[in-house]
Amino acid sequence: MKKITLLTTLMIVALLSFMTSASAIGTDKEYTPVPPSEDTVTALISSIQNDNGHVSIQADPIEWYEGAAADQKFMEREKDAAEELGGAPDGYYIVNDDQTLRTYEVAPDAQVLMQIYDHDGTYEGMDIKWNEAVSLDKYLAIMNNDKLMDMKSFPYHLTIQDGKVVKIVQQYIP
């Protein structure tokens, strides 16, 4: 019985991996890292609120590393694990030494780009659509819907100009 359960689990994992890869390949866009800049903060969002049309985000800024930079930072901070694994797991690494929350005001016309979210209340509807533009109102609804996936578990790149967030990009994590 244990062998059947193990085999079934492995088949489901393989099928889900294939479906995720197929949906990612089948899009007309592909993943591209958000380039670091002085006006962009990467953060974990703890809450988002709309108070009479004034949207604000409470977030914990983090350091986000990908590729070779992730491997280097992982090696600096996790030497034993880095040697065993050969680099940062899944190609990214997060540093969060200061967990102080900051509040950011969001511009009413902020651009929002999502990678994955609950489109229709089904697991099948959570396919990857790279940099899918959604309205700020839709983003508020997405962030407040944690039935299938907690959207606050993803990092977001927040572009800030004149003291307001003008662009929000969800960082996909495998």
Image: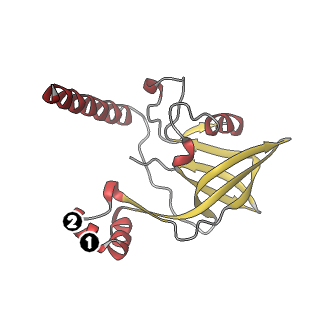
Label 1 element class: helix
Left-right relation of 90 to 100: left
Whether the residues at callouts 1 and 2 have beta carbons within 8 Å, the answer is: yes
What is the quadrant of residue 84 in the picture? bottom left
Q: Position of residue 29 (x, y in %)?
A: 44, 39
Q: Position of residue 152 (x, y in %)?
A: 57, 46
> Where is mark 1, residue-wise?
80
Residue occupying the point 27% across, 33% down? 13
- Label 1: how many Cα within 10 Å (few below 14, some 14–19, many 20+): few
Left-right relation of 9 to 68: left
- Label 2: how many Cα within 10 Å (few below 14, some 14–19, many 20+): few
Residue occupying the point 20% across, 27% down? 5
Left-right relation of 72 to 59: left
Distance of label 1 from label 2 (alpha carbons): 6 Å
Q: Which three-letter amino acid code belongs to the residue tagged 2?
A: Glu
What is the quadrant of residue 132 in the picture? top right
Farthest residue to the right: give it: 52
| Closest to the observer, 66 or 100 | 100
Q: Which three-letter amino acid code belongs to the residue tagged 1?
A: Asp
Q: Position of residue 8 (x, y in %)?
A: 21, 26
Residue 147, above or below 171: above
> Where is mark 2, residue-wise?
84
Left-right relation of 74 to 116: left
Q: Quadrant of the N terminus?
A: top left
Q: Position of residue 26 (x, y in %)?
A: 37, 31
Residue occupying the point 33% across, 54% down? 90
| Closest to the observer, 155 or 107 | 155
Label 2 element class: helix
Farthest residue to the bottom: give it: 76
Residue occupying the point 27% across, 68% down? 82
| Closest to the observer, 84 or 129 | 84
